[in-house]
Amino acid sequence: MVKILRIVDKYAGYIIVFFMSVFRIFDCRKQEKQKFLVIKLWAIGDSVLTLSLIKGLRKSFKECTIDVLILNRVKDVYECYHTDRIFCMDSFTDQMNLIRRFRGYDLVFDCEPYFNLSAILAFLLGKERIGFSGQFRSLLYSKKITFRKDQHMVQNYLDMIRILGKKYDTTVLEKLSVGIKDKSKVDAFVAENFHNKTIVGITPGVAETSQNRMWYEERFAELSDRIIALLNCSVILIDGPDNKDIVNRIMSLMKQRAVNSQGLFTLKENFYLISKCSVFISNDTGPMHVAAAQGCRTIGLFGPNTPVLWGPYGKGNTAIYLTNLKPAIENDKGIFREGNREGYMGCITVEDVFEAVKECLG
């Protein structure tokens, strides 16, 4: 589904952007900005990073309202944080509500790095728009910021506030808060399985794009065995249903006993479950950013993507990045090259990650 959307967006989007750019002369600018919309259509981890932007807006504009426009796949992230209203593009009811909000927002923040659709939506919904420069879709923005590859993505999003003359910065991610019902189920599970032992969480899989981001199952198994046997910790594997075979293979290769939580919890419950881990190890994927937001000492394993942009944000977190190859992922251009998993991830050894775990545990 994601691949189809990208293809349609690439070709149809250019034509729509061209014709819409002519109508920028009708932009209506207001001095006072109070009604904001943040667009972040997909990617759980990237959605977590945009929460820093929302926090910065609340700090900088005291009386503002902040809505978000998303796809349903990331709705849980924003439901676990303070936003005024959530609109899902894959909801017919929300689509009708958005039509009634034509040019209804004072300012729209387009947090998608390259997507034409998000720029088109921003143009239709906002009197003014902020997005990334250097692309054809940038014609639709009122203000543009540079997609800088020499700073973290959190800082790129915060540049959207700074271009408005506001000063805001943060060294931590915003925590995801879940309800009592979600917590109680997880608390019971943790009490039954871990008996007050230190918990190390692992997400061994990745999402559908760029499978070459994934470290090797055999190494995850060996690493888990060493953590359990040598550090006297418990290990839990936390991953999505699409990566069931990966998790099962790791479990079958292990000599020690790890806990497999796959299929037991909702996404929100997993947010809280991750917060129970003292250390969290993940490929460059969504749960890594969730773990950093939840206060875990997080270790991110990188290869096709650069941790300068996407590493686990915050003090005490670590990115292991040892490849000599050029990045295969260019987020601002929508380029996700597959292949050469060995060249990107093979240079990270079990010893490299094990030493990082020991350091995180002190």
Image (spheres, rainbow, N blue to C red):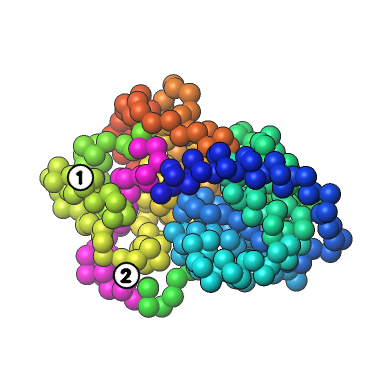
Looking at this view, name the residue that lies furthest to the top.
324
- Residue 356 locus on image (x, y percent): 37, 39
Three-letter amino acid code at the position of disc 2: Val
Q: Is residue 283 above or below residue 60?
A: above
Q: Is residue 257 above or below residue 213?
A: below
Looking at this view, name the residue that lies furthest to the right.
31
**Mark 1 / mark 2, whichever is N-terminal:** 2
In the image, residue 94 lies in the stretch drawn in magenta: no
- Residue 230 locus on image (x, y percent): 22, 44
Q: Dot 2 corresponds to which residue?
A: 186
Q: Dot 1 corresponds to which residue?
A: 250
> SS of the residue at dot 1?
helix
- 162 and 125: which one is in front? 125
- Left or right? Give the position of 159 relative to 322: right
Q: How many marks?
A: 2
Q: Could you say which disc has been placed on residue 288 in the image?
A: none
Three-letter amino acid code at the position of disc 1: Ile
The answer for how far apart the CA atoms under marks 1 and 2 are is 23 Å
Q: Is residue 294 visible?
A: no
Q: Is residue 227 above or below residue 58?
A: above
In the image, residue 191 lies in the stretch drawn in magenta: yes
Q: Which residue appears at 47% of the width and 51% of the height?
A: 43
- 3 and 65: which one is in front? 3
> SS of the residue at dot 2?
helix
Q: Which residue appears at 62% of the width and 66% of the height?
A: 98
Q: Which residue appears at 31% of the width and 26% of the height?
A: 342
Would you identify the image quadrant in which residue 304 lies? top left
- Residue 13 locus on image (x, y percent): 60, 43
- Residue 4 locus on image (x, y percent): 44, 44
Magenta region: which residues? 184-211
